[in-house]
Amino acid sequence: MKLVLLDRDGVINVDSPDYIKTPEEWIPIAGSLEAIARLSKAGYTIAVLTNQSGLGRGYFDHEALMLIHEKLLSAVTHAGGDVDLIRYCPHHPDDGCDCRKPKPGLFHAIAKYYDMSLTGIFAVGDSLRDLQAAASAGASPILVRTGNGVKTLVNPELDKNIPVVDDLGDFVDQLLNGELNGNA
């Protein structure tokens, strides 16, 4: 199976320091839906892994999150693509769960769901915690400059060997052109 793992906020849609709390606040980054469609058409399965601490903080409820994800899925479908799976961490950062990135719990859940190793599987994120969780699970992290990506680029903890792309469309271009290698 050809699998690609994507963070949500800052990779697929515009991020907000105030959280994405309603479907109206969920706005795709230019070109991201088309990039997912290109991946789908190239035979890739797409899974989304996202921290959603706004649930644990009480900023929105599960129903609102489901509506946001329905909008995401509908928008991707309308663009000609498919997201096979969305997994999220609903916990507050202080809850000490294993699923909140930078811990690898969401990645392990994906590996179990698909009954496969994540070695060599690309995981695209915009924050250090996305990249750390991916690496901890054996996946190959990719940093996008969208969302928090520019800020992440100057983080001294960033592994300088992690490939950096402009956005999701640039990642797809490089992947489909054979310019990226898993676990680079």
Image: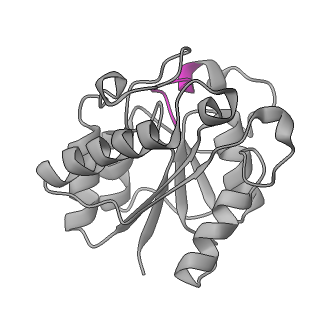
| Count of numbered marks | 0
Q: Quadrant of residue 158?
A: top right
Can the viewer see residue 161? no
> Which residue sits furthest bottom?
115
Q: At 42% from the left edge and 36% from the top edge, which residue is drawn?
A: 64
**Image quarter of the N terminus:** bottom left
> Which residue sits furthest top?
18
Residue 120, position as x, y percentages in the image? 58, 69
Residue 8, position as x, y percentages in the image? 46, 41
Q: Look at the image and give the residue range highlighted in magenta.
A: 144-150
Residue 88, position as x, y percentages in the image? 57, 50
* 146 part of magenta stretch: yes
Taking depth in this image into account, of 181 and 37 the one nearest to the observer is 37
| 87 sits to left or right of 183 | left
Q: Is residue 81 above or below residue 131?
A: below
**Image quarter of the C terminus:** bottom right
Q: At 47% from the left edge and 30% from the top edge, which residue is drawn?
A: 10
Taking depth in this image into account, of 28 and 41 the one nearest to the observer is 28
Taking depth in this image into account, of 44 and 72 the one nearest to the observer is 72
Residue 148, position as x, y percentages in the image? 56, 23
